[in-house]
Amino acid sequence: MVSYESVLLKAENRQRAGAFKFRGAFNRLSQIPESERSAGVAAVSSGNHGAAVASAAEILGIPATIFTPKDVPKAKLDLMVDAGADVQTFDRSIPDREAPARAFAEDSGATFIHPFEDPEIMAGAGTTALELHRQVGKLDQLFVPMGGGGLMAGCASAMSVLDTQCRLVGVEPEVADDTRRSFNAGEPVTVENPQTIADGLAVPRPGDNTFAINSRLVSEVMTVSESEVLEAMALLFTETGEVVEPSGAVAVAGVLKAQPSGGVAAILSGGNVDVDRFPQVFNR
């Protein structure tokens, strides 16, 4: 059995805008030509990508319009609004969540910023693993939360060069296991309207680009239950003082479930959880 203290944690919950997403968003937005920036950017997000795009846009002086579900956590909504973004909401259950943002971008001339399929988004996310490798050196296993697959695609690409012996383990909620099913099927599979406490990972289908990368480089995709995610959140707070949202605790839940040996690290992908919601973790 592996003790908790032996697991290294990459605390992306302390990143600007509260999640790893800022890495990819800033990388992508900073490459928009000056002549195109006045038209703005448009993004669709369950929260963290939108907050990251809004924050990067504010820094770079680019107008941002973010499309997000009506039930987005207030902590994430506030980050978007406070960064000056124009926030438009939609029903989470609509079949094509990207459609409103893409239509807006086409009509306005704004640049559409995909949350995980864009190569520059993946490359920015991959700096998480690049930085981790510089900080701790070689690892036996790296546990990474998986939604659309952009964080893993970037990290796996980096580790395939920096640390070829490191085993990449993707972790996703049992009730939003589109990547696990896709790996088993050998092609992207859709899970209709996944409902999970880990709202940032409630993606119905992995991206074509991210799946092509992850299916080559990732060793395993495992799932964790909702209660296991909550237990990981509680443990992280009581043992380290880190406030991590459900999506951000999924990788640690995977470590606790798998009980791996050797040099192990997990990415805490985000910490944007509502203040009034966090105590529910301990009540449950």
Image (cartoon, rainbow, N blue to C red):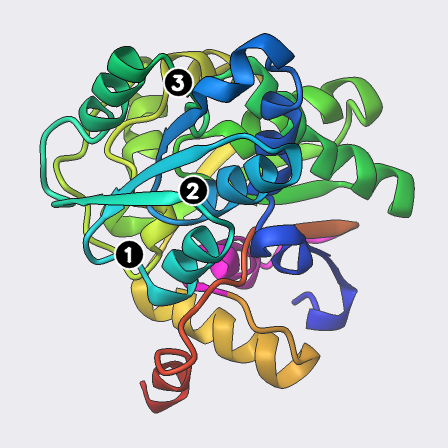
Query: Label 2: which residue?
Result: 50
Q: Earlier in the sequence, mark 1 or mark 2?
A: 2
Q: State the CA–CA distance, disc 1 to disc 2.
A: 11 Å
Residue at left offset 36%, top offset 83%: 276
Task: Look at the image and tell me in which quarter the N terminus lies.
Answer: bottom right
Residue density around tag 1, few if under 14, some if 14–19, many if 20 or more, within 10 Å: some
Look at the numbered disc 1 and give the secondary structure of its residue: loop
Task: Look at the image and tell me in which quarter the C terminus lies.
Answer: bottom left
Q: Are marks 1 and 3 in contact (CB under 8 Å)?
A: no
Residue density around tag 2, few if under 14, some if 14–19, many if 20 or more, within 10 Å: many
Residue at left offset 37%, top offset 57%: 77
- Kind of residue at disc 2: Gly
174 shown above or below 93: below
Q: Are marks 1 and 2 in contact (CB under 8 Å)?
A: yes
Q: Earlier in the sequence, mark 2 or mark 3?
A: 2
Residue density around tag 3, few if under 14, some if 14–19, many if 20 or more, within 10 Å: many
Segment colored magenta: 245-262
Q: State the CA–CA distance, disc 1 to disc 3.
A: 23 Å
Query: Label 1: which residue?
Result: 72
Residue 30, horizontal then vertical, whole percent: 66, 23
Give the label on residue 110, or none.
Answer: 3
Residue at left offset 40%, top offset 73%: 274
- Kind of residue at disc 3: Ala
Residue 243, horizontal then vertical, whole percent: 57, 73
* Discs 2/3, front: 3
Please tell me whether residue 261 belongs to the stretch shown in magenta.
Answer: yes
Please tell me whether residue 12 belongs to the stretch shown in magenta.
Answer: no
156 shown above or below 86: above
Find the residue positioned furthest to the bottom. 283
Main SS type for the magenta part? helix
